[in-house]
Every structure is written in structure tokens, then in C-alpha cells.
Image (spheres, helix red, strand yellow):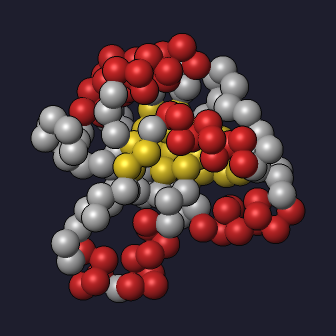
């Protein structure tokens, strides 16, 4: 079963945590997907592989543009549902967000320990920074993410 979500779902989740998504915020979204790899093992994890994620809509892209979101961080492999359930297009948000709006994407982040810490103290906001590996002539690189509360 495919689990998709939208910017409206993100705002609702933030509201449940007592915070607001504001202009220029970095979005850090934990779905539990990467952590489930360690619980289920490779065979089960990759069987019938369909990961959760954002799904494309013009309203979502406009929201990212209006909010000037600079970075989307998730614990999924693609930051979005790989194949859009409506159009069948593969990775449409990569084009709409990364190419068209300049949003950087951080994928496969292990966010379970951070989520556990946030749940324990009820603080869901923090400074997030990520230093990329210096790759000459590269267009992407692994990062060393740090959350400071």
C-alpha cells in the first residue's frame, strides 16, 4: 500500500507538535522508512518495495515556492513517492523542487534517534545544518547532518 502525504499533512503534523512551518524553514520529515530497514532486514524491506513520501501537486510546489523552503530532509530513498500515483511519472518532485526551485534534497537520513529525542522532551524545533563532502565538479554529495537543540 502506498503512503503519500502533502504539504497540508505536513502543516497538520506540525500543528500537532505545537509548531508552525515558517518561511525559510528546513523541513525534516521522519517516516520511519529507513529505520524499518534495520528492523525488517533487507529481504523484507525490499520485497514489494514502495516507500512513503510526498506526492506531486501544483499546490505543493507553489507552497514550497511561497515558503522558500531551502532543504527537504527525509528518511526515505527518494524524498517522494518514486512513481506518482496519479500520473505515473517517476520522481516528479525532483524536477519541480530541485531543478525548478533550487530546493536541496537530503535523502536516507537516519532520523529515528532525533525523533525519539524530540518526542521525549516535546521540542520539535532545532537548528539543522549539514556540511557536504567536497566533491570536485560534483552536483551532489553525502552530508554530515547535525541537529542542535
The answer to whether residue 133 shows anywhere in this view is: no
Give percent across and percent down for residue 123. Answer: 83, 53
Q: Looking at the image, which residue sits at the far right?
A: 121
Image quadrant where residue 34 sits: bottom left
Give percent across and percent down for residue 63. Answer: 50, 21
Residue at horizontal 49%, vertical 23%?
64
Q: Looking at the image, which residue sits at the far top?
A: 66
Quick check: 23 left or right of 91? right
| As drawn, 80 above or below 50 | above
Give percent across and percent down for residue 12. Answer: 63, 41
Give percent across and percent down for residue 89. Answer: 15, 37
Residue at horizontal 24%, vertical 33%?
92
The answer to whether residue 18 shows anywhere in this view is: yes
Residue at horizontal 31%, vertical 24%?
96
| As drawn, 117 above or below 64 | below
* Between 85 and 142, the one nearer to me in the picture: 85
Image quadrant where residue 1 sits: bottom left
* Between 84 and 146, the one nearer to me in the picture: 84
Quick check: 7 left or right of 88? right
Quick check: 83 left or right of 44? left
Amino acid at each position: 500500500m502506498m503512503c503519500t502525504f502533502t504539504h497540508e499533512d505536513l502543516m497538520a503534523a506540525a500543528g500537532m507538535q505545537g509548531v508552525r512551518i515558517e518561511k525559510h524553514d528546513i523541513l525534516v520529515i521522519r517516516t520511519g522508512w529507513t529505520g524499518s530497514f534495520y528492523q525488517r532486514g533487507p529481504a523484507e524491506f525490499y520485497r514489494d518495495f514502495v516507500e512513503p513520501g510526498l506526492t506531486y501537486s501544483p499546490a505543493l510546489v507553489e507552497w514550497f515556492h511561497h515558503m522558500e523552503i531551502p532543504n527537504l530532509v527525509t528518511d526515505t530513498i527518494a524524498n517522494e513517492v518514486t512513481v506518482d500515483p496519479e500520473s505515473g511519472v517517476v520522481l516528479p518532485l525532483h524536477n519541480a523542487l530541485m531543478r525548478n526551485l533550487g530546493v536541496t534534497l537530503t535523502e536516507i537520513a537516519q532520523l529515528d534517534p532525533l525523533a525519539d529525542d524530540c518526542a521525549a522532551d516535546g521540542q520539535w524545533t532545532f537548528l539543522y545544518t549539514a556540511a557536504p563532502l567536497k566533491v570536485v565538479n560534483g552536483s551532489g554529495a553525502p552530508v554530515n547532518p547535525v541537529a542542535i537543540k
